[in-house]
């Protein structure tokens, strides 16, 4: 049995981890880790690359690694890995990936406690065994318990930022086939959830065979999980699972509605249908008798559009992002659904980095790229001085940057307005990274949490409140500091934070990066209900990140957010007026 790209990448990653636990030379560790990353990102099947003799053309793949790849492709096994496993228990690899552990601690737990699995580690922690070890304590033990819990929540779901581009490519490819009449993504990916269990694709066609055939023979398929006349499932080389279904155009509406979900939304829809004497499934509406049994002789109603499905029940059309049974059906009944924000409403981006801190592009490159994307205004917001790892700006560099930004802004004329700003760190001790005398020199100040993220609720809340109340801070960046997949959101008193933001007229960000999506939808919804101002920003660290705006808009839509709640839908004139009024 031959192995898929993903399985080979996984094995190399595990080799790197085991070498690291064993204490091998870091260069040796890195060579396996880099090979693993390369393979994970390769869009073509390694089998094909190998038979073309192209393995060593890939970055970080030399002769040794290439030979190991060939060994796995031929035998489905790697002798080197099998021998490593005899020496280093495999479970240690899972342990070292728990947030707060790492290779040294994994080795410590193994040597001192004979712990070789996550389950055993949890039992040890529950019995306070970890806290007693050298260099450990109650706090680090608790952190590991939190990490184990986070791990159990994450397994098997892909981030939308990975899943959506892959899903869209498959959909586009299937839509090119002459048999395909209509197609859409369904399921959680259409609802815009942050993580995706599997991708669901629907195609309307009269002849399903060629579509299923094309789907299972895509070059990035690792294995075919099912191949039927109207439904097939595959696992991609990336590990992502994709279901595709083909159906008749006449049933498009009911099918798309059914397979978009959510399950809870579907259940409510069916109940409403039943209340009106109709049974609703993926195929049609069918009249039922007083015992809710389908009247076979009665005529069914087919729906070729979702509008027709909702219309049949007397409901307003519900955008997919709202279909979570969180009040959308009730609102649709009364025709009072919000007019959700759209990408084209956004005319500015208030959070981006340049090569002055940890960004990859110059200010000018970022500005030009924003002009191309049609923005009317942007703010350059590099990291502040205490964020050493991100090359944060000293006061002198910050002021020099502001000057450069203003010169560039003059040069740009009417094309775009470039504001001088900062993403100032809210330090772990609660203080802000620049004094007010410096902040007053800037057009727009963001304050963000980057450290001290596991502090107690009171402490985190106090830090956020202090930032919100600073007269120069206009916005809190990624307020909960959550990051997929490892970092939980901070524990804060959100009622207090939202109330303060409202009172001080401080913006809360919806960070559009798919690894953040922060504020999360539930909080964004609360915020806008309270009248807190929101802004959707990319936090771009390179030009390509500017295109992540779409994810932020989707996330905002999931929070029932409308354009009027979002500051960067305002014209430059209105934004300027607000800035000067607030000052
Ligand atoms: P995921 O894949 O875990 O991210 O979440 P979904 O929502 O994409 O779930 P999935 O892929 O299992 O199913 C896609 C949709 O199909 C789901 O949102 C609702 C619908 N569906 C699946 N199973 C059932 C069912 O048993 N009853 C009903 N009414 N709908 C279902
Ligand atoms: Ca799904
Ligand atoms: Ca599915
Ligand atoms: Zn940040």
Image (cartoon, rainbow, N blue to C red):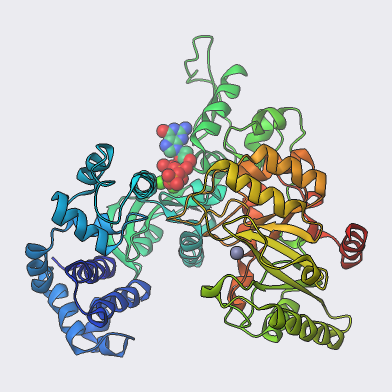
Image coords of residue 161 (percent x, y):
51, 61
Ligand 4 placement by image quarter: bottom right
In this rendering, the answer to whether 567 lies above or below 272 is: below
Q: Nearer the viewer, residue 431 or 392?
A: 431
Q: Residue at x 84, y 81 (%)?
A: 415
Image coords of residue 538 (percent x, y):
64, 66
Q: Residue at x 82, y 73 (%)?
A: 441
Q: Nearer the viewer, residue 223 or 96?
A: 96
In this rendering, the answer to whether 467 lies above or below 262 is: below
Residue 103: quarter of image: bottom left
Q: Is residue 380 visible?
A: yes
Image coords of residue 41 (percent x, y):
38, 74
Q: Judge left or right: residue 52 versus residue 336.
A: left
Q: Judge left or right: residue 4 versus residue 67.
A: right
Q: Is residue 305 visible?
A: no
Q: Nearer the viewer, residue 16 or 326?
A: 16
Which quadrant does the C terminus fall into?
A: bottom right
Q: Judge left or right: residue 62 versus residue 534.
A: left
């Amino acid at each position: 049995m031959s192995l898929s790209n993903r399985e080979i990448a996984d094995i190399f990653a595990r080799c790197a981890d085991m070498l690291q636990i064993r204490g091998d030379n870091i260069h040796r560790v890195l060579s396996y880790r880099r090979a693993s990353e390369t393979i994970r990102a390769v869009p073509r099947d390694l089998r094909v690359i190998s038979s073309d003799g192209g393995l060593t053309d890939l970055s970080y793949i030399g002769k040794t690694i290439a030979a190991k790849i060939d060994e796995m492709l031929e035998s489905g096994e790697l002798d080197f890995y099998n021998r490593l496993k005899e020496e280093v228990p495999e479970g240690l690899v899972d342990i070292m990936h728990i947030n707060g552990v790492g290779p040294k601690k994994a080795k410590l737990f193994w040597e001192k406690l004979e712990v070789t699995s996550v389950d055993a580690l949890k039992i040890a922690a529950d019995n306070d065994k970890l806290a007693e070890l050298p260099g450990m304590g109650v706090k680090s033990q608790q952190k590991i318990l939190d990490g184990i819990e986070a791990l159990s929540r994450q397994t098997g779901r892909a981030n939308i930022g990975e899943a959506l581009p892959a899903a869209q490519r498959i959909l586009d490819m299937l839509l090119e086939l002459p048999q395909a009449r209509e197609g859409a993504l369904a399921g959680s990916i259409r609802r815009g959830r942050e993580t995706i269990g599997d991708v669901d694709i629907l195609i309307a066609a009269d002849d399903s065979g060629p579509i299923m055939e094309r789907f299972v023979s895509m070059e990035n398929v690792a294995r075919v999980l099912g191949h039927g006349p109207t439904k097939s499932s595959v696992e991609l080389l990336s590990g992502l699972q994709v279901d595709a279904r083909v159906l008749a155009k006449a049933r498009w509406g009911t099918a798309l509605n059914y397979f978009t979900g959510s399950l809870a939304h579907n259940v409510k829809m069916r109940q409403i249908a039943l209340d009106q004497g109709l049974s609703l499934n993926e195929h049609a509406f069918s009249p039922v008798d007083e015992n809710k049994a389908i009247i076979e002789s009665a005529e069914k109603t087919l729906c070729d559009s979702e509008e027709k499905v909702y219309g049949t029940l007397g409901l307003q059309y519900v955008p997919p992002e709202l279909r979570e049974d969180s009040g959308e059906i009730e609102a649709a009944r009364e025709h009072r659904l919000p007019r959700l924000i759209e990408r084209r409403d956004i005319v500015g981006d208030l959070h981006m980095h340049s090569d002055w801190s940890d960004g990859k592009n110059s200010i000018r490159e970022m500005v030009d790229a924003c002009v191309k994307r049609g923005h009317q205004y942007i703010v350059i917001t590099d990291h502040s001085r205490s964020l050493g790892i991100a090359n944060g700006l000293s006061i002198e560099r910050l002021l020099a940057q502001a000057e450069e930004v203003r010169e560039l802004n003059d040069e740009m004329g009417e094309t775009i307005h470039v504001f001088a700003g900062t993403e100032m760190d809210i330090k772990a001790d609660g203080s802000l990274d620049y004094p007010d005398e410096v902040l007053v020199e800037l057009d727009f100040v963001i304050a963000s949490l980057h450290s001290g993220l596991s502090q107690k609720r009171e402490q985190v809340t106090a830090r956020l409140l202090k930032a919100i109340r600073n007269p120069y801070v206009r916005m809190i960046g990624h307020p909960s500091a959550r990051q997929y997949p490892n970092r939980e959101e901070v524990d804060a008193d959100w009622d207090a934070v939202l109330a303060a933001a409202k009172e001080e007229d401080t913006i809360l960000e919806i960070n559009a990066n798919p690894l953040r999506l922060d504020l999360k939808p539930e909080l964004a919804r609360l915020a806008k209900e309270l009248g807190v101002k929101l802004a959707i920003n990319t936090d771009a660290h390179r030009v390509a990140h500017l295109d992540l705006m779409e994810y932020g808009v989707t996330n905002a839509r999931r929070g029932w957010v409308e354009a009027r709640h979002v500051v960067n839908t305002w014209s430059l004139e209105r934004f300027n007026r607000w800035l000067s009024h607030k000052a």
